[in-house]
């Protein structure tokens, strides 16, 4: 497994899908606005403000919002090796409640590539990386972007 020659350098942001992406877009009316940065090797980091609209249980983030954030980050990681993917499998383990008003920090890593499958793992923490509040792992499937989304292009918001 090798980094793609056009992968950004460590510390640089990883490009947006598009401005209206729910996960990373700045133009989405409501979205996670996840900011993703390239780390060393096959790693990414990200931050996300936990806003009031993300509430699930009283005062804490909704588990589905957290799963969406993991999906966004981990689904972006295969781009480091030049693989545009879709999610094949995503599994999240919740370790602690995440309070509204906090800033959630993520780390993700491409672990392996096997034919069209890319295996990625991730953790989320609040202030101490040694104390994760959630874990995730997933399998992302390489696609031909133009063919995969061709039927939906006319409905896209750009």
Image (spheres, rainbow, N blue to C red):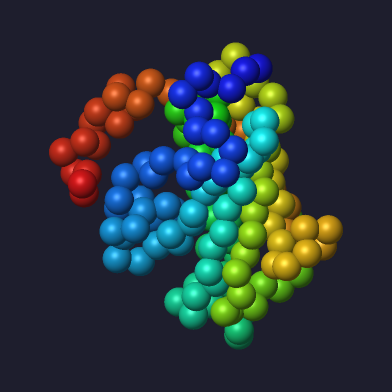
Between residue 59 and residue 106, name the one nearer to us: 106
Is residue 94 something that shows in the picture? no
The residue at the point 57 percent across, 44 percent down is 11
Q: In this rendering, would 82 be left or right of 27?
A: right
Where residue 63 appears, x then y in whole percent? 60, 65
Location of residue 127 (image quadrant): bottom right
The residue lying furthest to the top in this view is 115
The residue at the point 64 percent across, 78 percent down is 99
Where residue 1 appears, x then y in whole percent? 65, 17
Residue 117 drawn above or below residue 110: above
Residue 12 drawn above or below residue 146: below
Is residue 32 something that shows in the picture? yes
The residue at the point 64 percent across, 21 percent down is 113
The residue lying furthest to the bottom in this view is 58
Where residue 25 appears, x then y in whole percent? 36, 53
Between residue 31 and residue 49, name the one nearer to us: 49
Q: In this rendering, would 145 be left or right of 34?
A: left
């Amino acid at each position: 497994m090798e980094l793609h020659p056009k992968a950004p350098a460590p510390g640089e942001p990883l490009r947006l899908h598009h401005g209206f992406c729910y996960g990373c877009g700045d133009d989405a009316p409501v979205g996670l606005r996840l900011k993703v940065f390239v780390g060393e090797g096959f790693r990414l980091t990200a931050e996300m403000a936990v806003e009031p609209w993300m509430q699930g249980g009283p005062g804490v983030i909704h588990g589905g919002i957290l799963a969406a954030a993991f999906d966004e980050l981990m689904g972006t990681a295969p781009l480091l090796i030049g693989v545009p993917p879709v999610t094949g499998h995503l599994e999240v383990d919740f370790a602690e409640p995440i309070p509204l008003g906090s800033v959630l920090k993520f780390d993700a890593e491409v672990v392996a590539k096997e034919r069209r499958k890319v295996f990625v793992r991730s953790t989320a923490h609040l202030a101490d990386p040694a104390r994760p509040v959630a874990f995730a792992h997933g399998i992302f499937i390489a696609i031909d972007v133009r063919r995969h989304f061709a039927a939906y292009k006319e409905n896209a918001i750009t």
